[in-house]
Amino acid sequence: MRLGEHVRQVFASWRPGQAMVAIPVALIVLISVADILSPTHIHLGPLLVVAPALTASFGGPLMTGAIGALAVVAQVVIAFLHGGIETMNHQVQILTLLVVSAFVVAFRYLRDRHERQLSEVRSVSDVAQRVILRPLPHRIGPLRIASMYLAAAAEARIGGDLYAAARTAGGTRLLIGDVRGKGLASVSDAALLLCAFREASHRHANLPDLARHLEASVCRNLAELSETNIDVDECFVTAVIVDIPDAEPVVHVVDCGHPPPLLLRGDRVLTLGSERPGAPLGLGELTADDHPAGTFSFEPGDILLLYTDGIVEGRDRTGTFYALAERLRRWAGEDPAIIVARLEKDLLDHVGGHLEDDAAAIAIERLPAAPPR
């Protein structure tokens, strides 16, 4: 058992770069032998610089320096066998190879330091992403939930789409939104809106009041950012807020300029849209009736899908938009986790693996009521 664990540890610690070092070593041997066997007026030694340059593509500074030193030794051996190291030609070749190898090692060192700094920045960004955009639980009360988030830019960890869930005394409230804007303003709006939703969900009895509270929070944040010379003229947030009571098979929806939720019931897909959707958050000067709430049936076994426009605006090579409602109908009878997984794969296949905008989705299923004990 101990021997097997030791072997596994050895293979686990073995990196591809350690095996690839055989390539530059073989090149040094091959070039040296070819130069030694060639006539004295043919000089192949300068080709030895390929070895440290190639090593820098997969090895660290120490490995690159070792290969560079080995190439210099090979050049000295070639010079000794071809008339002596005292000749000016061989001395220039050795000095040139030494200088170039030193530059390659320095370049590799700077690259490794840059990669370490970038890794630290990414780790901090990942932590901030998890703090701001907390993962949703798989089960909240009588609901089963699955979510997905796809970033259009691989290096952009924060900003764009957002979602959150809050458990209240009599049900569950969920938010999904899309920040329209760029830079610090969009990140600040996303963080502030999520924090305001988690706090205000427990203080407001109905969704219109909650939507107006979120509207006021976004407007205050934009006003503060405008005082710091940040352009916030095109910053606003589209969002959908839903309230799902535990004891009643309905869902209350407030639409703030966002794509309406879809309800999968059997093999039918229903759009839970309002005749007069509310205005996006952050525009200001809204009246009490600007965020009306709609009530829809949400029975056990139904799947409610909240999503952002990055999904329905995804295009294939011919420019055809992603038909979310049609695709959702194909996955009737599946649980939320499977639906979200298939949605993610199907969307990426449709757009060719690259999204033009961030995409997020939440699938919620109401479970049948537990029998009384």
Image: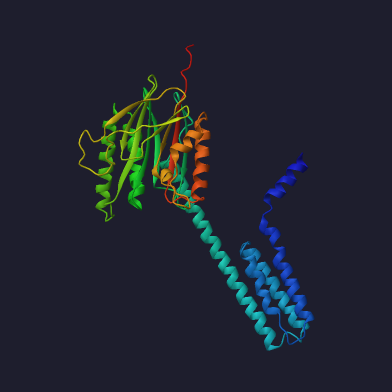
Could you say where residue 55 lies in the image, as x and y percent from the top left?
A: 65, 66
**On screen, 238 above or below 86?**
above
Q: Can you see residue 203? A: no
Q: In the figure, residue 172 lies in which quadrant?
A: top left
Q: Residue at x 68, y 48 (%)?
A: 12
The residue at the far top in this view is 373
**On screen, 27 above or below 58?**
below
Could you say where residue 99 lies in the image, as x and y percent from the top left?
A: 61, 76
Q: Residue at x 43, y 43 (%)?
A: 311
Residue in the foreground of this view, choosing between 236 and 112: 236
**On screen, 47 above or below 54?**
below
**On screen, 104 above or below 328?**
below
Could you say where residue 302 lies in the image, as x and y percent from the top left?
A: 45, 26
Total labels: the figure holds 0
Q: How is the image coloured?
A: rainbow
The answer to whether residue 355 is left or right of residue 204 is right
Q: Residue at x 63, y 80 (%)?
A: 96
Q: Residue at x 57, y 69 (%)?
A: 106
The answer to whether residue 180 is left or right of residue 22 is left
Q: Can you see residue 164? A: yes
Task: Give the quadrant of the N terminus.
Answer: top right
Residue in the foreground of this view, choosing between 67 and 324: 324
Could you say where residue 312 lies in the image, as x and y percent from the top left?
A: 41, 43
